Every structure is written in C-alpha cells, then in structure tokens.
Amino acid sequence: MLVIKNLKANVEGKEILKGINLEIKAGEVHAIMGPNGSGKSTLANVLAGHGGYEVTDGEIYFEGKELVELAPEDRAREGIFLAFQYPIEIPGISNATFLKTALNEVRKYNGKPEATPKEFMELLREKSGVLGMDPQFISRSVNVGFSGGEKKRNEILQMLMLQPKLALLDETDSGLDIDALKIVSSGVNVFKNNDNAVLLVTHYQRLLDYIVPDYVHVLSKGRIIKSGGKELALELEEKGYDWIKNDELIEENV
Amino acid sequence: MEEIKTNGLQEKDEISEDMQLLNDVTKNEYKWGFITDIESDTAPKGLNEEIVRFISLKKGEPEWMTEWRLKAFRHWQTMEEPKWPNVKYPKIDFQDIIYYSAPKKKPQLDSLDEVDPELLKTFEKLGIPLEEQKILSGVAVDAVFDSVSVATTFKETLKEKGVIFSSVSEALKDHPELVKKYLGSVVPYTDNYYAALNAAVFSDGSFVYIPKGVRCPMELSTYFRINNEETGQFERTLIIAEEGSYVSYLEGCTAPIRDTNQLHAAVVELVILENAEIKYSTVQNWYPGNSEGKGGIYNFVTKRAACRGNHSKVSWTQVETGSAVTWKYPSCILQGDYSVGEFYSVAVTNNYQQADTGTKMIHLGKNTSSTIISKGISAGKSNNSYRGLVKVGKKADNARNFTQCDSMLMGDKCGAHTFPYIEIENDTAKVEHEATTSKVGEDQIFYLNQRGISTEDAVNMIVNGFCKEVFNELPMEFAVEAQKLLAISLESSVG
Amino acid sequence: MGNDLLNMIELRDFNLPTTKNEDWKYTNVAPIMKNNYVLGASLGYENHLSTVLHDFFFQDFDYYKVVFINGIFAGELSDLTGLESGIIVDSLSNFQKNNSELLSRHLNKYSTIDNGFNEINNSLSSNGLVVFVPKGKVVDKPIQVLYLNGDKTENVLSVPKNLIIAEENAQVSIIANYHGIEGKEYLTNIVTEVYAGKNSIVDLYKIQSEEENSYHIEKVQAYQEANSLFNHYNFTFGGSITRNDINTCLNDENIESHFYGLYLAHKKQHVDNHTYVDHAKPNCMSNELYKGILDGESRGVFNGKIMVRRDAQKTNAYQSNKAVLLSKSAVIDTKPQLEIFADDVKCSHGAAVGQLDENSEFYIKSRGIPQDIAKSMLIRAFAADVIEKIKIDELREQINHLVFEHLNRVEVKNN
C-alpha cells in the first residue's frame, strides 16, 4: 500500500528525515516510536503533504502512485488520513458543514454519489456513537472550545466518516487520560480491517496496549534504526531509547 | 586632506559661473560682514549663515562640511516647526539662542558641601559612589578615581581592535572619508525641522566605527567621552558597524543633568551592514522642570538606524524620565533581507512633563522582523503619548511585527495616549498590535501593605514589574540604575 | 429632464478634506470631485414606481418597509401597516410639518459639521428618515429602509439626513440597506443622528451594497443617555470609495455601546472606517470589533479612537481590528488610538494584519476539501465573530451569502 524509499526531508532548511525506508501493506498496523525531535511528526506531515516540509530526496508510492507531487487534498481523496497532533480550530464553520464537505469531496473524487442529508446524518450518528460523542457537537464550530480529549476524538470521528485506506495517527494518545485513550483506541480498532492500514506515531508504549501493532520501528535522528515486532515496544518501555542507541553503536562497531 | 582638496576642485569645475559668482559674493560677505571676533568663545545670539560659518570655522572643519551645514541651514529656513506632536510649549524664538559657545568646564567646586543638597540626595538614592558624585557635580577629583587615566586605558584597548571612538570633530580631522561617507546618510538634513537645525549648527557628538568582524570588547559609553564638560545643545552621533561587527553603546547618564540650555535637538545615525548588530541604550534624565512646570529641557531628537546589510540588527532601548517636553522616535529602516529592528522603551512623565515618543519600523527587505515594547507611565499632571509607525513596503515579503504598548496611569490628573499607525502594502505581512491601559490598583497596594510593605515600595514593585520587559534589555548596571531612577521620578506621586 | 434644467452642484464650492488632513490621511477624495452632480431631490422618483424593488430587500423575516430613492422618501413604495400608534416612521419633511417642536429638540443637536461632506449634507439636504419611538414603546419588527441611489443618465448626489430618536425605555431595530442603480457615477453623502434615551436599546444595521462606480460617505453620530445600549453593525460591500464615521458619545453612567464592522473589498475599492467612542462619564462600557477582507488592488483603512475623559472612571473600553490580505496588491492602513485621562479604567486595543492561516488551510485540505473551499471556510472563520453578532437569523445568513458573492468565492454556510 505504502512504499517509502530513501526519503529525505527538510524543515526550514534543516534536514530532519535523513533516508527513511518503510513498507506498509494492507491489513497491517505499524508503530513508529522514538524520542522527541527524532522526526516522527515530520514523517507524518510529509506523507500528508504539508507545505512547510520539503522533500529533498527519495520516493513515496501510495497504491503504486507517486505521492510527492500530489496536493494535500488529493492525497486525502486517494485515501491518506492524518489525525493531527494539534487539531486546528476553525471558528464559524460547524463540524457538520466541515465533515459533509469533506465526505462529498472524497466521494466525488472516487466517482461515488454525494451523500444525501439523511445518509450523512445516519452515518454521523453511527460513527459518533462508537466514540460516545454527544450529537450536539455537530453544530459547534470545528474544534473551537473543545478539550484536548474532545479534539482527539473528533479526529478519530473524521477518520471513521471518511474511511481512508491509510490512517496516520500523529501522537493521538498524547494528553489523553486512560478512559479517553480507551475510547480513541476502540475507534481505531473499529476502523481497522484487512483492506486498510494504520501507522501510529507515538512516544509511549501505552497506546500499543490497546492498538496492537504488527511492526514497531524506532526512529532516531531522522533514520529508522531498528525494526521489530510488538515486543520491541515493550523492550523500549523497559530499557528506554538509550538502550537502542548503545545497541546501535555496538552493531556499528562490529 | 589631499582628497578633500581634489573634491573641492572638482566641485568648482562642475558648478556654473553664476554659482561661482554667488559663491564669491557670499564668501565676501563672510570676509567683511562678519562682526564676531573669531577669538571669541561665544557667538552672538541668533542664527544666520554667518553664525553657521563661524561654528564651522571655529571647529576647523573642511570646506565640504561648511557647505553641508550651509545647505542644511538654507533648507531649515524653508521649513516649519512640526505641529503634530501631542505636546504644548511656548513658541521657541530661534533668534534668541546662542548657537556656539566653546566647550566649557563646569565651575570647579572645592568640596561636596558646595553642591546643591537636593542633587546630593538624588545621588545618594541612586547609590552613586562618593568619588563619582564629585565628578558629576564638578568637584575637583583626587587621584583615587582619575577619569583621565580610565579613559586612556579604555582607548588603548579599543585601538588594538581597530575601533574608532572619538568626537565627531576629531573624526573629521582623523577620518574625514568615513564622516563624509556616512554623515547625513541616515538622517539627511532635509528630514525634519530639528534635524535640519542640528545639521546646520551641531556642536559635537560621538563618532564610532567598528571594523569588519570586530566585536567591540566593551560597552561604549558617552560617560567616558564627555567627562565633566557640559553636554552640547545640538549633539550629533554617528555609529557605523561594518560587516559582522557588534557594539553596545550607552548614551546618557543616570545622574540628573542640569543644563542651562533649554532647547536640545540631537541627531543619532546608526549604519549597520551585513550580519552586524548595534545595541543602543539610552537613559535620559534631563531636567524636567520643577513641580509647577517651570523650566525644564525641550528634547527634540531624531534617532534613526539603517539596517543596510542582510541579517543586520538594531536594538533601541530607552528609559526616559527627564525633560519638560520630549519628542523622539528612534526608528529602524530594515533594508537588508532578514534584518531585525527592536525598540524597548520606558517613558515616565510626572508633574507637568509631556512626552510624545515611540518608534518607526520601516520594513523594506524580505523576511524582516521587528518588535516594539513600549511602557508609558503617567503621573501628576503629565501627558504621555506613544506614537509609532509600522510600515511594510510592497517588496518586503514575510515581514513580521509585534507591538505591545502599555500605559499606566497614577492619579486622575494625567493622560495616556496611544497613536499607532500601521501601513501594510504586502499581503505576506503579519503584524500584531496590542495596547492596554491600567492603573496601579489600590487593592494591589493594599495587598502589599498588608504584607508589611510600605506604599512607596509597593508602587515601586508594581512599576518595576510593569517595566520588566524593557529593563531586561538594558545592560546590567544600567538596569539597576534605571530602576532607582524610576522610583525617584515617581516619588510621592501616589499618596 | 435635460441637464440644462437641472441645478448642477460643484463640490469645489465646498471645502472637502485633503490627505493633508490627519483624519483623511489615507483617503483621497479627488476622484469624487471630478464630477458635477445633480441633486437627487430634483430628479424625482416617479420613474421608479414600477421598478421591482423586492430583490433589494433582505427577505424571510417580518419588517416595516421604507424606501428612499436618491434621498427622497417614496411613500407609495413603503409599507408601515401595523405600526403601533405613537411610533413615527416618516420622512424628515413630513415630520417637520407635524412635530416641529420635537424635531428642533433633536435635529442637528448631536452631529457637528466636521468637514466639507457634512457641510454638503447640511446645506443641501431637505429630506431623510425619521424614526421616533416614544417613551416605553418597543417597535415589534425591524424597520428595513432601502436607500436606492444613482441614475442611468445623471451623476446624482443624494444627501439623506436621518434622525433616530428612542425615548426612555424605548427599543428599535433599524436596517439601513443601501443599493445602487446601474448607470453614471453617483455620490451618497449621509448624516445620521441617533438619540438613545435613558434605558433605551437601539440596533442600527447598515449594509452598503452600492454600485461599484459610486462614492459613499456617511457620518453616524449617536448620543446616549444613562443605561442605554447602542449597537451599530456596519457591513460594506459596494462603492468605489466608502468612508464611514461612526461616533458615539456616552454622556451618562452605565451606558453600553457595541460597534461591529465587516468590510470586504476587491478590485480597486477603497473602504475607510473611522470610529470614535467618547467616554464622558463613569461606569460605561464600549466594545468594537472590526474586520476587513481585502482582495485585488483594494485598500482598507481603519481608524478607531477611544477617548476616556477625566470623569470617566471605571470605564471598560475595548477595540479590536483585524484584516486579512488575500492578494499581493491589497493594502491596509490602520490606526487604533487611545486617549485616556482617567486612571481607573480598563482599556485595550488590538490590531492585526495577516493572511488566512496556512496550517488551518492544510488541515482542511488534508480532509480532501479543495483549495477554493478551504479558503472560503477560512474567510467564513475570519468573519464569523462579526457575522454571528447579527441578532436577526435570516439577515445573518443573507449577509454571509453576500460575503462570498462579493468576493466571488464559493459560499460556505453552516447547515
């Protein structure tokens, strides 16, 4: 589904990603872990096409299509969804307007008919039910006056509504209490099936108790320095990132 | 000197016969019509071309300098005194002023006992050491604190680095090419009424040149240069920071300056080239007049910095507590790409003082940024105005400005005014302006009283808190003195 | 009527402000002066009796209908059926006939002649709108006033002089709706005086959608008594040069004033809003929120002044003005001013100029929404806090529509 080859990217002229290689297949859950400043969020933003990140080298293929030149809205319509670490507030635009516009744009792009108001409301009721959200939120402005937990839940709701092929969750667990974390995770688990894939970007192992990854990658200084199964996350939790760094040194010395 | 002669010749070749004739006539007039004794130390009252020539001659200036002064004078005659500042003062009779008197020493006193006791009280509050007090008040100094020797060591260190720090008059003799190149290049004599007047009659001032790549090893202070001479009425300062250089310049003195001259019209020009930085700090404490509003200095200053090179930076920091009327807008012309302008100001007015002060940030280069932090405190029957301009030109892509101007009122007889102008001609600009007005809250004072703090100390604490962002920008010792100065000028303003 | 029969007015006869005048620093009125104008009153409105006016009105809510054509009251086209007795909505000239004493107590009592435009209005105006709400009365529906200006063949000068009087405990909501007739360049030059008596509430909406070859100048001067509330809502869409002066004097205690403004300009439009809030007495509150969206080669000017006089202790005064520049050639000049003479006050102003936020745009686009809609959403987001202040739901939606129509962008509305 997603193939990343030797990806290098700059932020404000500074190289953050220094050659990332990664492949994600349908049905898989990948977790990218790493200390602050290792480039985790950069990777997520580069995949979604944020203008502030400049790809200087390498290739990204999504479902066989070259991604680098694609506009962010087209990436979204192709099926890439980024749950933002810091969801944006948009005063004066209701969640209903926002979601409906997005849903119909994605549908139009994929040659599907627009959702009727009735269909939209039914879908919305179903998905917000999964996340235990008060239907009142729909008439409120996008993320305005939402608590941190509500914002993250709103991100997951948008994901469930838009049904992307690849969901990138950028630190979706940060700032959530345990109950909110469970709800958000259950949303992701409802979403997950054999045709789509999830890339979790996280600092902590905690989230992985609820969303079990097939692969764990450790990112450090813009490179994936170690990959493994879900047990790698536990090992990291126990020994910390320094352990990898030492390990890496030893490997390099050998 | 040779170079100047050639210049003079070239000019002669270029000017028409008519002009030559005119030149001859005016020169003749000067030769014969000049009534003042050249040997005299003081020019007669009033201002005309003769006086301008007299000043230039007295200072032994090259011909081009005399011409420049004359052009400025002629231009000044066509101008009108600005009426737009929010200040009121009686009309100045420009013919009733003496424009030149030789630098004179303060009267020498034998001991501190002869000094005005009020002045001594202020010194004490400022914590100025006894020996320094003597220098400041003109008492003969003993060998313990020999300012001459201090100044000498100081000059030698600078010389090693190639830094030039002298008076403008000296610079005109030793480095005429530098003065000619830069004088009036930031503030032309056509700029405004007082800048024109200053150009015509300026007495002296500081000249600083920091060569390429040099970080000036110490803070330069007018304190060392002026010593115990009375400061000029029309000062002119010129600082040039060559590529990659840095200098921090301190102007003024925290001790109260009593001067018999009522009108002060200074000009400060800063030239900052690529990757260079000038930090210019001022503490202004001219005589503000008495509590009835009698006397006091009119302080009409033009200060401007030209950030000519890419990545150049200028930072103006000022603490103004003095003068009866202040009219001053240190400005930054951000010409170079990525150049940075900063303005940090505390202006305090008490009794009948009036201040109309602020800054201008002119964004011309790309990716330029500026910050304005202005704190105005009004007490007594004073009026304190902030007037500022943020302009983003058509080509100044990605310009950024943040402005915060806060006013504090003490008592209900004073006024605080804010007049910011924002002119944006480029759609990538981001400009933010915030202003607030508040008072020293009675409940705040009560709270502090209740914790055993006197009202006076409570007010000082609150005021210092209000000004903290600006004090943080001042060099350490300057900041400490500025805080004390504030306390003195606000004394007994809250009952 | 031919030109020769009409009295041509030369603006040169009046001392119009130049850019040397600090209050007109950013607005050059020279283009207005290049025409000679025919006074609207001399044209009559008979030609327009058959004009379909319906589309000019804001619809889908109940209102009293008043029509002025080139500054002349068109009684036949107005509909005041059901207006409670005692409340008067009429032309200035009729009101003068029947209530001269009342009129003389208020007319020209609040607005002074500050410049040549006020002078023109004062010396040439013979008519305008009067709304009189006596003590304790509440006007049950908004009064929507259509001012239709301009002419196909003449340069028209319309000079309405409006007077709104809300006596003690009265309440009224007025929608002043300015439209133009396609044709020659024209000038609308209005003076509106508002008297808000003790404990009264006056809502005054102004929606200016004049033709793009027109000039529009208005001065609103309000005078407020104790405990009164005056809300002014100012929406500018049309006009080549627009200048609004919105002033209020808070001359007693516990008064509240709110000024909301939204101006949109594109092409070479020039919109200048000046506000002046004069706090003369203690314990009052004022709040201003002005937003501008500038596209094309347009220029916006905002000059807001808050005056807090010596007596006006415990004043709370706020002002915020923000502008976004949507194009390379748009220009904004803003000058928020505070003049404070009382010490126990809370006053602040803020001004910001910027663009639509890039991160927000990315967020919207990352949900598959195209660029043009993303931009529209951000325009809506920017304008929302002003638009949402409109108390009449239907009016709010229709003004939202005008925002996008005027900027020629995809409309975004909440459903």
Image (cartoon, coloured by chain):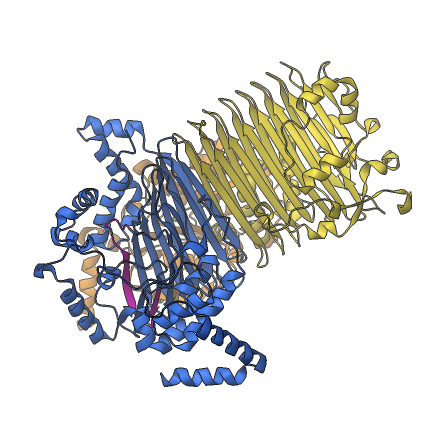
Residue at the image position 53 percent from the left and 52 percent from the top:
C368
- Can you tell which quarter of the image residue C135 is in? top right
Q: Position of residue B405 (x, y in %)?
A: 40, 45
- In this view, C283 is above or below A130: above
Q: Magenta stretch containing residue B392, yes or no?
A: no
Across and down, in percent, residue C37 comes to 80, 45
Between A162 and B54, the residue placed more toward the observer is B54
Look at chain A in the picture and name its colour.
Answer: orange
Q: Measured along the vertical axis of the image, is residue B203 above or below residue C33?
A: below
Residue C199 appears left or right of C117 = left
Q: Is residue B257 magenta?
A: yes
Q: Is residue C63 visible?
A: no
Q: How many marks?
A: 0
Side of B464 relative to B80 (left or right): left
- Colour applied to chain C: yellow
Residue C291: quarter of image = top right
For the record, the magenta segment spans B237-258
| Image quadrant where one finds the N terminus of chain B | bottom left
Rendered position, C8 above or below C95: below
Chain B tint as drawn: blue
- Quadrant position of the C terminus of chain B in the picture: top left
Residue under the image location 32 percent in, 47 percent down: B322
